[in-house]
Image (spheres, rainbow, N blue to C red):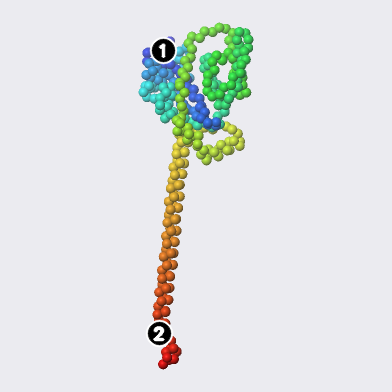
Amino acid sequence: MLTIPLKTSDSHFTLFRLIALPSQISPDKFFKYSVDYAFFALQHSRRSYLLLTEADYSRCDKGSITICPAETAVYSSQSLKGESSLFFQTENANRLCRRKLVFQHRTPFLQRYGELWVYCFPEQQQITPRCAQDNKQVFRTLSLTGNGLLHNATGCSITSDAFQIFPELHGTTQTKMDAPILHLPDNITVITDFELQRLIDIQPLEIQKRCDIQERVTVSLQTYDVESLLHTRQISLLQEKRTNYVIIITTSLCAFIIFGILCFNLYSHSRYGRNCVCKTDEATNSSINHPEPGSAQGET
C-alpha cells in the first residue's frame, strides 16, 4: 500500500525555528525569553499558524518539504501566544512571554543554520577565520560581541580562545534547490525602561547572599524569574512603607505620653505650693489673735 499525503491550500505552512538569545542590560545581568515551542509555522495567507515542540517535529518526515501529522491545533493570527507575538512583534509580547533574568552569563553560543552561523557572545571574543579562496588560505581577525550572524563561513575554520568551528568540506559540486528562510525581526526591547531601572536597582538579600557564596566557590550561571523578582521588589517597598508608618505612629504616641506626664507633674507641684502658702497664713493669723499668757499678765 502506498500512502500519498494530500495538500490543500490552507495546509501549506512556512516553518521557522525559534532561537531566543539573551540580551544584556548591565555588566552582569541578561534577559532572555523562555519559549515552550521550538518551531513556529506560518500559513501562506498569514491568517493562521501552528506551534511545534521538538517532540512534534521529530514525528515529521524531513526532506525538501517537511510533512507533519495533523496532531496539533491551528491557531488564528488573532489568537496570540508568546511565540507568535514575538514573530508578529505585538506590543503585549512582554505579557504573553515568560522572561528570565540571568546572572553571570559567560558561555558563548554558536549554531549553524544553512549558510549562516548565529552567535551570541556575552563577552568580547577575538576570532580568526581561515577560509580557502582561489586555492589559498586567507586569514583575518575579527572582534565580536553581542548577538549577530556570520555569513559565508561554512567553508571556513574559525578558532578563538573559547571555541573552534570546523569547515564543511565537499569534493563535488552541489546544487541547492531551495534556500532556508531566515526571519530577522526588528530589535524588540525585552523589557520596558521602567522595568529596566527597577531590575538594575534590585539587590534582594537572598540573591546577594547566594551571589557571595557563588563567587567564593565558582562563578556559575544563575537564572531567576523576572515576574517573581518584580513582585518581591514591590512587596519589599510596601513593607518599608508600612515600617515607616509604624515608627511614626509609635514615636508620636510616646511623645504625647511624655508630654502628658510632664503636664501632670507641673500641675501637682503648683497645687502643692498653694496649699503650703495657705497653711502658713493661717498659722500667722492664729498667733496674732491668741497672744501668749506671759505678755498679757505683764501688761496688767
Question: Furthest residue to the top?
Answer: 173
| Cα–Cα gap, marks 1 and 2 | 139 Å
Mark 2 burial class by Cα count in 10 Å: few <14, some 14-19, many 20+: few
Image point 61% across, 18% down: which residue? 141
Q: Is residue 153 left or right of residue 56?
A: right
Q: Amino acid at mark 2?
A: His
Can residue 105 be seen here? yes
Q: Secondary structure at mark 2?
A: loop
Q: Residue at x 42, y 11 (%)?
A: 4
Q: Nearer the viewer, mark 1 or mark 2?
A: 2
SS for dot 1:
loop
Q: Which mark is residue 251?
A: none
Contact flag, marks 1 and 2 (Cβ < 8 Å): no
Residue 133, placed above or below residue 29: above
Q: Position of residue 59 (x, y in %)?
A: 46, 19
Quarter that holds the C terminus: bottom left
> Which residue: 56% across, 24% down?
145
The numbered disc on residue 5 is 1
Q: Earlier in the sequence, mark 1 or mark 2?
A: 1
Residue 124 vs residue 275, the one in the foreground: 275
Can you give x and y, in whole percent of width and height, for residue 177 in the image?
48, 9
* Residue at 43% in and 22% down: 87
Question: Dot 1: few (<14), some (14–19), or many (≥20) neighbours within 10 Å?
Answer: few
Q: Which residue is mark 2?
A: 290
